Amino acid sequence: MNLSEVIDSLVKERSLDREKIIQIVCDGIRTAYERRFLDYKFIVVYNSAGNLDLFIEKQVVEVVTDDAEEISLKKARSINPKAELGDAVNVPFDEKIGRIEVLAARQIIAARIRELEQKAIYDDFKDRKGSIIGGTVHKKERIGYSIIIGEQSGFLAITSVIPEEQIRIGAPIRVLLKEVLTVAQGGYQLILDRVSPDFVKELIHLEIPEVFEGIVEIKNIVRIAGYKTKIVVASRNKEIDPVGTCVGIGGARIKPILKELGNEKIDLIPWTENLEQLIKFSLKPAEIDRVEIVNEKQAVVWLARDQRSFAIGKMGQNIALASRLTGIDVQLQEIVSPTDQVILQDIYTEQRDQDFDTQDEEERE
């Protein structure tokens, strides 16, 4: 395979710019020759036949004192009949470089082509950062998965996979383009994600036209991947219910999103400027009696005993999400019902009588 075929192959297989590849090859060869022949300034030209021509630049002088940089007028005119004193002439150079210089040239060219590839990937994907893209699961690696996106590979780390979800080799997958690196790390420039709140946010933008069009706005979103996402939504049109719009008739709109997230739940919360009401909504599915704002960072929430577990959620995750969503540290306080008050009073009276009886016995003794 000659040089022209190699360049054509790189252009076709890696979608690289032909002129840039030619320039890289010429620069690599020039650098290798300059390492071998320190006194010369080389010019490398890719000719129409698909080969490289090598020249050294010399100045036309009347008397040559430095053969590396100067050439006589007579010799210069044998190369270029129009040469005059003071001109620069490209003199063909026929000497060869050694194996070491050839290897160095290959390394330089390979490195520069990798840089060109990385820049091309960055330019193609930089404007898509933060959006959802589709791909195919290519292979399982030690700490994640390789995902094929078009002609490129992206990396989905184990920590960016929704807990307990099954990732199958060869299966289609939707991912958030979390980061586009300028230089590949671990062989990848496209860093992917499925656990961030932004992943759910972008799914909603894709699935719900009113959100995409800005009629319904996502005011805030928090998430514990694999457990629950809480989303505050507001409508710019008073006639449109933001929660109902996102859910759809019979849950038609929210179901595809829930399917994408597996067993994860979504709590949709209507936006209100009333902080007490917002805190109430944020603790769903618990039924809250009342909310008392203590200060800018704390609130006491009053609720029945049987609602406490709902408010707290699995391993305290529901109340943690509510606090993150509202920016308020929520403290729960149980309401004592009249029946409970009677029971507590009876227990208190019984305990008090026992204490008196014990005291009388001690005094008699």
Image (spheres, rainbow, N blue to C red):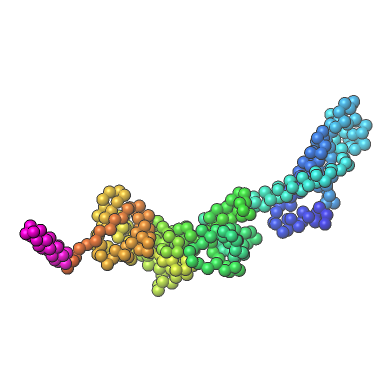
In the image, 313 versus 357, the foreground residue is 357
Q: Is residue 30 above or below residue 200?
A: above
Write the residue at 41% across / 62% down: 229
**Which quarter of the figure has residue 230?**
bottom left
- Left or right: residue 358 versus residue 143 is left
User: Farthest residue toward the left?
Assistant: 364
Write the residue at 33% across / 61% down: 312
In the image, 253 versus 150, the foreground residue is 150
Residue 357: in magenta span: yes
Q: Taking the image as drawn, is residue 149 in sight?
A: no
> What secondary structure do most residues of the magenta stretch adopt?
helix
Coordinates of residue 333 in the picture (x, y in percent) = 25, 58
User: Farthest residue toward the bottom?
Assistant: 250
User: Farthest residue toward the front?
Assistant: 365
Write the residue at 62% across / 49% down: 183
Write the residue at 61% across / 51% down: 185
In the image, 195 versus 14, the foreground residue is 195
Which quadrant does the N terminus fall into?
A: bottom right
Q: Taking the image as drawn, is residue 4 in sight?
A: yes
Q: How many marks?
A: 0
Residue 266: in magenta span: no
Which quadrant does the C terminus fall into?
A: bottom left
- Left or right: residue 144 versus residue 35 is left
Q: Which residues are magenta?
A: 341-365
Coordinates of residue 5 in the picture (x, y in percent) = 80, 56
Q: Is residue 62 above or below residue 237?
A: above
Coordinates of residue 44 in the picture (x, y in percent) = 81, 43
Coordinates of residue 268 in the picture (x, y in percent) = 38, 63
